Image (tube, rainbow, N blue to C red):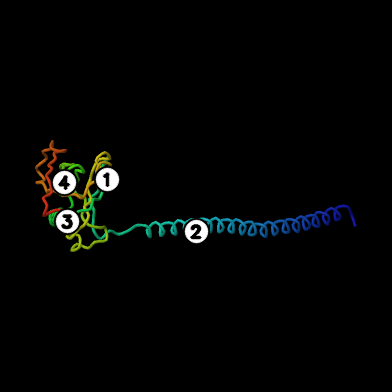
Amino acid sequence: MNTKKVWMISLILGLMVAGIVYISIFAKDNTTAPASGSVSQEQDDKKDDVKSDEEIEKEKQTEKDKALVREFVNPIVDVSTGKRAISIRVDLAPGVSGYTAPNSMVDVIAYETTKDEATKKEFKSAVLVLENVKVLTSGKSSDPKENALNYETVTLEVTVEEGVMLSLASRDKDGFYLMLRNTEDTEKGKAGYKQTREVIKEEAEEKK
């Protein structure tokens, strides 16, 4: 065998070995790529699962928030900025016989009975405590329309100072009367006006 043939055989064997090595490496790369792709896919799926859990928690919280929201059968007017809502107890007649409605304007009279210990005489007093106050609603939030007309409470829109004064008056006074105003009548200036008279004997006996 001459030198030329040896070189040819060596070249052919070298090419065959190189081909086998190349095919082996290429096959290994193809096998590794899907594996890494599968890992990435699994990681993405896990991320999606985390997002789904967060969305589920948000949905649960939303359902809880909805459960806390109460539906008011008897509607109330929105309280103006800077004002407050306060409810006072009134009987049907003192409450203008059921004619006060949301957005009505009223004056509030507080009345009380006092006794002069020296003379043993009783006196009734009435004082105008608030003027031109807006009615937000009458009755309870759960009252249907028919019951709201036979209300025992009226909710008024007041300032903070008026609310404090009215809450104190509700403890000190015997009760309240409402005077319904024309909505175009905005005149004020008579708050504090008071009338007092002696309780006659027949009235005192009836009260007993």
Left or right of residue 179, residue 157 in this image? right
The C terminus sits in image quarter: bottom left
Give me the residue at 44% from left, 59% from top: 60
Q: Is residue 178 above or below residue 16?
A: above
Amino acid on which disc 2 is placed: Ser
Q: Residue 28 at x, y = what percent?
A: 70, 58
Residue 2 vs residue 61, the one in the foreground: 61
Q: CA distance from mark 2 to mark 4?
A: 78 Å
Amino acid on which disc 3 is placed: Lys
Q: Are marks 2 and 1 in contact (CB under 8 Å)?
A: no
Residue reaching furthest to the top: 189
Q: Residue 166 at x, y = what percent?
A: 24, 44
Neighbours of disc 3 within 10 Å: few (<14), some (14-19), many (20+) = few
Neighbours of disc 4 within 10 Å: few (<14), some (14-19), many (20+) = some
Query: Which residue position is annotated with label 3?
Result: 207
Mark 2 / mark 1, whichever is N-terminal: 2
Residue 164 vs residue 11, the one in the foreground: 164
The N terminus sits in image quarter: bottom right
Q: Residue 121 — which label? A: 4
Query: Which residue position is annotated with label 1?
Result: 167
Left or right of residue 14, residue 119 in this image? left
Query: Which residue position is annotated with label 2?
Result: 52
Give me the residue at 23% from left, 43% from top: 158
